[in-house]
Structures are given as C-alpha cells and as structure tokens.
Image: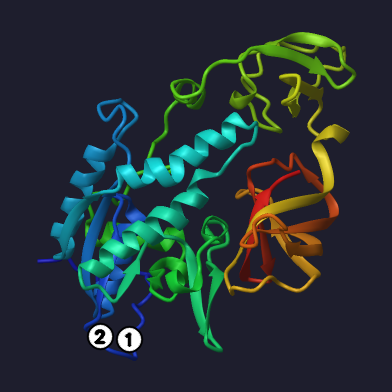
Amino acid sequence: MMNQPNSDQKNQPSPKPLTENTSQKVVVGMSGGVDSSVAAWLLKQQGYEVIGLFMKNWEDDDNDEYCSSRQDWLDVVSVADVLGIDVEAVNFAAEYRERVFADFLREYSAGRTPNPDVLCNAEIKFKAFLDHAMSLGAELIATGHYARVRHQAGKVQLLKALDSSKDQSYFLHRLKQHQLEKVLFPLGEITKREVREIAADLGLPNAAKKDSTGICFIGERPFREFLNRYLPSAPGPIKSVDGKALGQHMGLAFFTLGQRKGIGLGGSQEGTGDAWYVARKEMATNTLYVAQGHDHPWLLSRQLSAMDASWIGGDQPQVGRYSAKTRYRQADAPCEMITGFANADKSNQEKFDLLFTADQWAVTPGQSAVLYDGDLCLGGGIIAN
C-alpha cells in the first residue's frame, strides 16, 4: 500500500481535482529521479490511471561508471511499488542515435555547440515516447519537467513554471501543437522544494537522489574524453585576438565560446592576469582565438541570427519587442525581433534576427535562442551567428 504523507505536513500543495474524466490513462516518463516520481504521484492523486514508462536511450559503454541506467531502473521499480502503479521499460537507443546523437556529432564537427536536450525532447521524449504511449492505449503523457501548458482559443500554449529557478520551457520550445495537446506537466505549479518534501513524506526511496546534470541520457561523464571517442582530433593553433600564437589545441570541436577551463593556457601571457576565454573558432584555418577577461569585446554582442525556427503556435510571431534566452542558465534579456522570413532553400525552415537592448555574453552558434512574451514561450531557433 502506498505510504501517505503526514497529516501535519506543511507547504505541500493539495492535488488539483480533475473537472473532466478522472479515469483517463496517463503514461508518465519515469527516469528514476525525484521529479518524475512525484509527478506520477500527483497524477494518481488526481484520479488518473497512471502507468510508468522508463526509457533506455543509450547503450554504448553500458557498463561504464558514468552510465546509471541500471540504478535508475531499480529506482523506478522501487518508486512504482510505493506508488502502487505498473511500470515498464522501453528501449529507444536506435531512435536516439539516429535522431539526436548523429545530429549532435554533426554539429560539433561543424564547429557549433549543440544542445542535445532540446532535440531529445522534440524527437524522443515527446515523439518516440508519445507514440509508444498511445500504442499502450494512453490518452495523455506526462513528465517531470518544470513547465506549464494552457489551452486557450483552440491552441495549446507553453508557459514557464511557477518556480523560475527550475523552469525548463527553454528545453521544450521545439514542441508542436499535436505534442503539447497530449502532455501534462504536474510540477509546473509547484516548487522544487515542495517536490522534495512530498517525496520525503511519501517515503520514496529516491527522495534525496541528486538531480542529473549530464547530457540527455548519456550521463555525467568527462565530456572531452567522451567526445573524443566519436570525433577525431584535429590539432591547430591557439591565437590571441591580435594574432599572437599562444599554443596548440586538439580540435575545435572540443571547445565552446566562453569556455574558460581546459584551454591549456597557464597564467597570464599578456601581463593583465585575467583569465583566458574562448572567443572565436575559425573553421577555415582551424584556429582557436582566445581573449583575456570575461567582458572582452569579442565575447559580447547585441545581435544574433537564428535558423531552423520552431514556433509553438505554428505561426511566426510578429516583429516586435520580446525577451529571449540564448542559454538555459540565463535571465530573460529584453530584445526586439527585427526580421523573420522563410528560408528560400527549405520552406519549412525559418530565419529570424534578434536585437538586444544590452550586450549578451558568449552567444554561441548551435545553442538555442528562445523567445518569450512574458511567461509565454513562443518558440525559437538555432543560433547561426
């Protein structure tokens, strides 16, 4: 029998009652972490028929010390036992390699820095997973993401989570209407602190399990060592912004704009004492340019162009004033969408330009520029330059 929370528990939100059919079948993506576990409990409390689904999406070096899939599965089974729900495992490794990891490697080879979590959500968690859940007879799916959905005027909108420190709408901005209309985000209305409290009061075995911060499904492993397994080294020169030779790099793919650690340069070589930062990657000459000082002009920009845009509402927003994020851990930055037009070669791709009111630091090609209108996530695109 499921353990019940203490009657004197404080700050725990009461599950919101359903106003529609309470017997709807929901398949919850369960990772073994505390977020998806509490999401499953909240839905069961609301009257849904809940089934847990554990996705295994990475098989390379499955015995590696950084691969936690076995322990994650054991945690899912243990949580399901406490909650009194059925759970199954499904293998999407082939889909992940084809739809996400291959693109990940192509982008790094081209000198860009992709965000695999964005593509993983669009292609695996809310496509392959969604399709599988529907084949099980589910009417809806749910995950432990911190975000909200709102149905308004015949459209489904993606909103930021109430817990701004945990909001994950940035990673979900490529979802389409047909995906969002089938999705529930039970954690969107509560805070991470409340999630931990619920898990502890329920006696969940993973209540104190630390959050995963690694690459989607690949884990928290030494990144350069991992990438070197799949991409060849291509040594080249490291130069200062004024062209002075400073050393050698092992391959542009292993560096990203704004990177400070792991460049291979010791202390100051220019006499300022400031740290070195990756400032530019010149693919034509295989040259890595570095600058000293966090706020060097080469690291600051007020404008960007983005390609391969994806708009949640289906239509590109009107040019005008919004806010945007150019990386996940960043406050919204006021900006203006100054252009937006269809790509002549690929009609399903779009380009847009953003002009910010203040300098943005280390805007990185390959990362996502995500556009917001207040709490409403409009979508975004891949930063080109």
Question: Are discs 2 and 1 less than 8 Å apart at CB?
Answer: yes
Q: Which residue is mark 1?
A: 18
Q: Residue at x 84, y 57 (%)?
A: 355
Residue 369: x percent and y percent? 67, 54
- Quarter where residue 125 is shown: bottom left
Q: Residue at x 30, y 48 (%)?
A: 92
> The residue tagged with tag 1: helix, strand or loop?
loop
Residue sitting at 41 percent across and 63 percent down?
194
- The reply to whether residue 275 is in sight is no
Kindly identify which residue carries mark 2. Answer: 22
Disc 1 residue type (three-letter): Leu
Judge whether residue 228 can be spotted in this image.
Answer: yes
Q: Is residue 385 above or below residue 268?
A: below
Compute the Cα span from label 2 to label 1.
Answer: 6 Å
Measuring from the top left, give residue 107's x and y in whole percent. 58, 37
Q: Is residue 191 left or right of residue 92?
A: right
Q: Nearer the viewer, residue 38 or 97?
A: 97
Q: Colour scheme of this structure image?
A: rainbow
Mark 2, Cα crowd under 10 Å, few <14 / some 14-19 / many 20+, is some
Which residue is found at the position 32% from the left and 59% from the top? 129
* Nearer to the camera, 340 or 119: 340
> Relative to 131, is 362 on the left or the right?
right
Q: Residue 11 in the image: x percent, y percent? A: 41, 70
| Picture quadrant of residue 338 | bottom right
* Amino acid type, callout 2: Thr
Vertical relation: 232 (above or below) 294? above
Q: Which sits in the foreground, 281 or 16? A: 281
Name the residue furthest left. 1
> What is the total number of numbered labels drawn onto the structure image?
2
